[in-house]
Image (spheres, grey):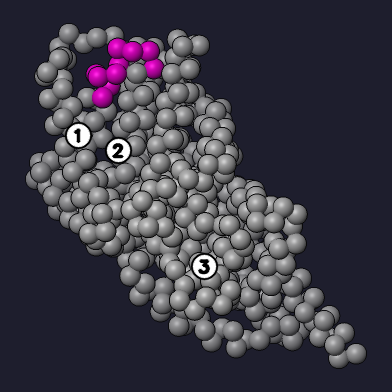
Amino acid sequence: MGHSLRQGCGLMAEVFAILLVAAICVALFAGYPVAFTLGGVSLAFALAGSALDLFSLGFLGALPQRIFGVMTNAVLLAIPLFIFMGVMLERSRIAEDLLETMGRLFGPLRGGLGISVIVVGVLLAAAKGVVGATTATMGLIVLPTMLRFGYDPRLAAGVVAATATLAQIFPPATVLVLLGDQLGNAYQAAQLSKGIFAPASVTVSDLFAGALVPGFVLVALYMLYVVAVAILSPQSAPAIPPDPKAPRGLALLGRLIAALIAPLALILAVLGSILAGVATPTEAAAVGAVGAIVLAALRGEGRLWPALVATVMKTAQMTSMIFVILIGATMFGLIFRGFGGDDLVHRGLSDLPGGSAGAIMVVMIAMFLLGFVMDAFEIIFVIVPIVAPILLAMPGVDPVWLGIMMAMNLQTSYIHPPLGPTLFFLRGVAPPEITTRHIYVGIIPFVVIQLAALVVLWFVPGLATALPRALYGGS
């Protein structure tokens, strides 16, 4: 009878774990603040579970130590530095110069302005690493230009929204830093569960290297789509009429080189030092932050101090948001495990047909659907710590490949209607001629492209793993 009672209590505790996740999803969908929803709902379930003798409040004793570990994590220190770099670059007018020059270079071709927008978006993504900043910059500068030259509003909105989200996948993307930290912990836990007491590690640098080739594949698919639209529907992506006053030939080439020097130098300083193993991501982020200040000073016409104050305020706001969410997610993780939720997830994934592939497929679908109601940071902090140790303990699962699959999936969640954050960012800065319907319809082909890129990466994992193995000898 005692065994049956314990079994019944265990079953009830797992039911509480399921209800905890459902309650958080409902609260988030209702619009409650994420960080306080994660912590508050979890604490309420912990108290209710304790009253019913289904949960031990002793689990919460580990919370202060975990929060201290979060706040002193050297890897996460890169987050405010990369955010500072991205926000400060908004003040340096690099995007305006790049777009104008690239537009003159490709503009005479049908679809050439769209191609220019994608190229500029790649450079901004690699220099900023923050989707919101990239979307605001691109939307304010690019959309009016594309509309002025006769581009279809749907195509213009889709190109800008999709290109802005490249900041989710191109290093030094904030998402890759957070995923690298979470997957590093999960990979070590997975190896320890197998009895490997000298576990290998996966780092942020591994994910940075792994993201490059898939990122450029995605860019190539975007460009092919714009070219196809220009061929099949010329009126949707017309050529820019030549400006007799604009520089040509060597003068245009010189202007292009001058416009590229600053962003390329910053990208090489930050990303090159990480990939070469000269600096850690945190050290490279500090170099990038200083470089952004220098660029703003050189191009800010004496307005550096107001820009610096505004940048520090914005950085503090965004960093606080991320870390408060992480603290709330830490409480959720403790309480979810206290109810036996991790065992429930482990059994559920292990019993799925198809082995490792079936489990990963279910997790990917779940992450895609959660993107309708949860932000990428929330998914990384809440879902990844639960499922990643289980997936990485399965045979044949490469941690870098899994990380890039998750990153591209989260990137897709940023743009798929109706609740993709990028769509709201763009709606906030778009000119009146661009309606919400234009944005939603225009982004659908790019969501399909994203999903196609995920399928390609699923069947060709070497796209994500080859470069890290060449640089660092494998994960």
Q: Measured along the vertical axis of the image, is residue 266 above or below residue 77? A: above
Q: Is residue 467 left or right of residue 462?
A: left
Residue matched to label 1: 260
Q: Magenta residues?
A: 102-111
Quadrant in the rendering for residue 234: top left
Q: CA distance from mark 1 to mark 2?
A: 9 Å
Element at label 3: helix
Residue matched to label 3: 186
- Residue at 26%, 35% (x, y): give it: 95
Amino acid type of the residue that numbered disc 1 sits on in the rendered structure: Leu
Quadrant in the rendering for residue 133: top left
Residue 412 x %, y %? 53, 42
Residue 397 x %, y %? 56, 57
Residue matched to label 2: 123
* 385 within the magenta span: no
Of the two numbered discs 1 and 2 on the same chain, state the one appearing first in sequence: 2
Q: Is residue 3 left or right of residue 140?
A: right
| Tag 1 near tag 2, CB within 8 Å | yes
Amino acid type of the residue that numbered disc 3 sits on in the rendered structure: Ala
